[in-house]
Image (spheres, rainbow, N blue to C red):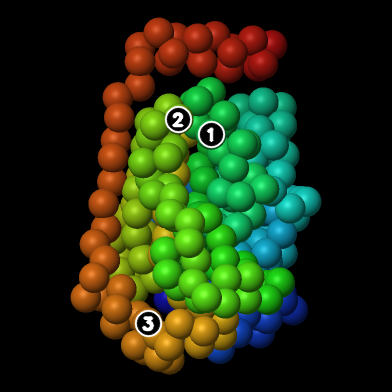
Amino acid sequence: MASKLIEKYIRPGTLPHIWCSGCGHGILMRALAQAIENLGLDKDKVCVVSGIGCSSRIAGYMDFNTLHTTHGRAIAFATGVKVANPEMHVIVVAGDGDLTAIGGNHIIHAARRNLDLTCILLNNDTYGMTGGQFSPTTPMGDVASTAPYGNMERPFDTVKLVIGAGATFAARGTAYHVNPTIKLMQEAISHKGFSFVDCLSACPSYYGRKNKKGNIVKMLEWQRDNAKTEKVHASVEPEWLEEYDKILKANKK
C-alpha cells in the first residue's frame, strides 16, 4: 500500500527526501497522502500550499497543484487560491515557526474569517531548517540555539489559539499515533470552514539533541506515553453557511 501511495501522490524523482534521519515529517506526509486517498479526492482539485521550512518541502514532494511560497505567507496565498476557486480543496502545510511566528497574524485572521481552508501544522518545537532556534511552541526551559540557557517564553497552545480566533474545527495528533492522526486529517479536509490539525512531529537533529531527548525512538516513545489525540468541532453558524453558499453561487457565475 505504501508503494502505491508513493506512485500516486509523490512526484517522480523527488525521493529520497532531504529530511534528517528520524524526522517525523515523512511520517506525517504519508499520513496526509493516506487521508486524501481515503477521501477519494480528485488530485486536480487538491492544492497544497507551503511557506518556508523543513515541513514546507512537502509542497515540492506531493503531486498535486502546489505552491511553495514565502516565509509565513502560506495562508495568504492559500486564501487567494480558495477565493479564486472555491471548489478546490486547499491544504496549507507549514511548521511551527512559519505558521505561528512570522505567519501568526495570517492564521488568526484565517480562523476569524472561517474560510474553508485546512491547515496542517507540522510541529517539532523548533526552527529546524535554519539552525534550531526556539519557536512559539518550544516548551519553557528547553534549550535552543537562540536560547542557550533555556526558553523563557510560554509556548502557544495552538489548538486553543485557533479556536479562540474563530476556527470551527481544531485537532491535535502525533507522528506516533498515525492512524488517529490520519482520521483527524480526513475530518479536517472534509470540514466546511477553517480546520486546523496540530501534528506533533519530532526533530532529533536539533531539538532532541540539544535537549537530551534521546534518539527518534525515544522521542516517539515520549509521544506514545504522554500525548493523546484530541479534537474540537465547533458548530458553524447557519447565517455564516448561508453567506458562504451565496459566495459560491456568485463565483460559479
Which amino acid, mark 1?
Ile
**Secondary structure type for disc 1:** helix
Q: Earlier in the sequence, mark 2 or mark 1?
A: 1
Residue 48 visible in the current orientation? no
Q: Residue at x 43, y 15 (%)?
A: 241
76 left or right of 168?
right
Q: Nearer the viewer, residue 47 or 54?
A: 54
The residues bearing labels 3 and 2 have C-alpha atoms spaced at a distance of 31 Å
**Vertical order, 252 against 24 (above or below):** above
* Earlier-in-chain disc, 3 versus 2: 2
> Of the residues shown, which amino acid type is indicated by label 3?
Met
Q: Quadrant of the C terminus?
A: top right
The residue that mark 3 highlights is 219
In contact (CB < 8 Å): disc 3 and disc 2: no
Real-space CA distance between mark 3 and mark 1, rounded to the nearest whole angstrom: 30 Å
Q: Which mark is residue 165?
A: 2
Q: Earlier in the sequence, mark 3 or mark 1?
A: 1
Q: Indicate which disc residue 108 carries.
A: 1
Residue 6 at what x, y percent from top left?
A: 56, 74
Q: Which of 16 and 18 lies nearest the eye of the viewer? A: 18
Relative vertical location of residue 73 with respect to residue 165 in this rendering, above or below: below
**Looking at the picture, does residue 69 appear above or below residue 175?**
above
> For this rendering, which residue is in front, 148 or 122?
148
